[in-house]
Structures are given as structure tokens and as C-alpha cells.
């Protein structure tokens, strides 16, 4: 029996921190091109691949033009059914909590229109024999920003999703931006 995820719960400080971290990462990296230390690494199957050195971390992003409308890309990329068609490791996604979009807008300091924000438990299959399957608890927030839409994903602890020995808990930070092309005719992801 599935229960309805709770809504309108107070945003705990760690949730606000995860929201702000995800927003900062996507604001800094969501713009196509060699801006802010990003360097073009190569192009494969129409996707420009960029790298950025950040201390001991190496960040990566891909930029690709798509012939689809922004709303269709967002719907596809944020639904488990859509993701399963491109991510064969995805086993299951469970929404743990739905956050009030207005409270999230306030937490982000305004300037964005939040469409959806939820805490999601993600389970994956093992990538290959001998490697444990992974899980993650993330906050996934979709909002309008600078003429497009952003989906930020950031790992977060949640009392309803304790670490289990069945999986190795993944640390997640990332997301994607979808920008409408000027004059229509698709979008850039």
C-alpha cells in the first residue's frame, strides 16, 4: 500500500542548505560555453563535453541541442518512466516528501518560480557483477530561471530514508538546465 508523501512540512536547515547548494552549482554551470573555468573537452554524438577542475574534484557537463520543446524534455527527464528508457541502472524512484514551492522560493532568496520540489529515494541496480547496487536520497527541484528551466539534484539526509546495508549510499550533486532556443524549434540541454 503506497502512502501519499507529506507536503507543506517545514524546511529543515539541511534541506535549505541542499537547495542553495544545488542552485549555486546549476547557476554557475548551467550556461553553455567556456565560462567560469569550463573548458571544452570534446564533442561526441552532437553533445559538447566540458570539464572544470575544482580543487580535487573534476566537474563535467554536456551541452546538446534537442528538437523538442522545453516542457516535453522536463517531463521526460524528471519522470521515472522517461529515465528508465535512458538509464538502465535505475531500479525505482519513490517520492518521500513534496515541498511547498513557495517555501522553496523563499529559501532560494526569490528570483525563481518553483514548479516542483520533492525529496526522492532512488534505487539502482548494480552496474556490473561484483559492484554493490547504489541508492540515494535527493532533493529534486524544478524551477524557471533566466529564460529556461533548471532541475537541481542534491543529496540530502531524510529520517524516512535511513542508510541500509542492501545498498551503498551515493553522494549526489548535479542537475541540468533546459533553455528554449530563440525563435523556437527546440531547446538546449
Image (cartoon, helix red, strand yellow):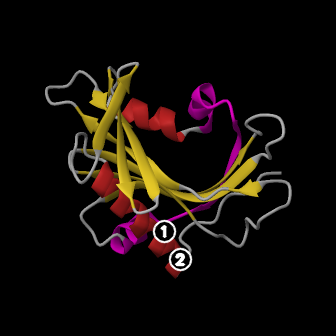
- Could you tell me which residue is drawn at 21 percent across and 45 percent down? 147
Determine whether the residue tagged by mark 2 lies in a helix, strand or loop. helix
- Could you tell me which residue is drawn at 67 percent across and 30 percent down? 88
Quadrant of residue 101 within the rendered picture: bottom left
Residues packed near mark 1 inside 10 Å, few (<14), some (14 to 19) or many (20 plus): many
Q: Which residue is mark 2?
A: 14
Q: In the rendered structure, are the residues bearing label 2 and label 1 in contact, judged by CB atoms less than 8 Å apart?
A: yes
**With 185 as the anchor, is 16 left or right in this view?**
right
The answer to whether 96 is drawn above or below residue 69 in the figure is: below
The answer to whether 127 is drawn above or below residue 24 in the figure is: above
The part of the chain drawn in magenta is 80-107
The answer to whether 9 is drawn above or below residue 154 in the figure is: below
Taking the view exactly as shown, the residue that stands out farthest to the left is 183
Out of 25 and 35, give the one closest to the viewer.
Answer: 35
Q: Position of residue 40 (x, y in %)?
A: 29, 36
- Could you tell me which residue is drawn at 28 percent across and 24 percent down? 186
Residues packed near mark 2 inside 10 Å, few (<14), some (14 to 19) or many (20 plus): few
Is residue 54 one of those drawn in magenta? no
Q: Position of residue 145 (x, y in %)?
A: 26, 52
Out of 2 and 21, give the one closest to the viewer.
Answer: 21
Is residue 82 one of those drawn in magenta? yes
Q: Which residue is mark 1?
A: 18
- Could you tell me which residue is drawn at 29 percent across and 73 percent down? 109
Determine whether the residue tagged by mark 1 lies in a helix, strand or loop. helix
Q: Position of residue 63 (x, y in %)?
A: 33, 34
Q: Position of residue 14 (x, y in %)?
A: 53, 76
CA gap, disc 2 and disc 1: 6 Å
Taking the view exactly as shown, the residue that stands out farthest to the front is 56
Amino acid at each position: 500500500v503506497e502512502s501519499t508523501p507529506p507536503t507543506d512540512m517545514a524546511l529543515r536547515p539541511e534541506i535549505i542548505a541542499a537547495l542553495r547548494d544545488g542552485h549555486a552549482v546549476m547557476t554557475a554551470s548551467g550556461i553553455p560555453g567556456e565560462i567560469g573555468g569550463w573548458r571544452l573537452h570534446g564533442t561526441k554524438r552532437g553533445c559538447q563535453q566540458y570539464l572544470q577542475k575544482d580543487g580535487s574534484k573534476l566537474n563535467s557537463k554536456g551541452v546538446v541541442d534537442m528538437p523538442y520543446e522545453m516542457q516535453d524534455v522536463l517531463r521526460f527527464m524528471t519522470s521515472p518512466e522517461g529515465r528508465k528508457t535512458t538509464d538502465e541502472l535505475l531500479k525505482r524512484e519513490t517520492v518521500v516528501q513534496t515541498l511547498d514551492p513557495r517555501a522553496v522560493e523563499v529559501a532560494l532568496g526569490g528570483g525563481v518560480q518553483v514548479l516542483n520540489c520533492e525529496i526522492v529515494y532512488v534505487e539502482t541496480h548494480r552496474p556490473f557483477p561484483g559492484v554493490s547496487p547504489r541508492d540515494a536520497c535527493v532533493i529534486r527541484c524544478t524551477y524557471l530561471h533566466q529564460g529556461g528551466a533548471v532541475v537541481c539534484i542534491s543529496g540530502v539526509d531524510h529520517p524516512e530514508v535511513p542508510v541500509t546495508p542492501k545498498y551503498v549510499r551515493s553522494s549526489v550533486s548535479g542537475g541540468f538546465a533546459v533553455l528554449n532556443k530563440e525563435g523556437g524549434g527546440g531547446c538546449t540541454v
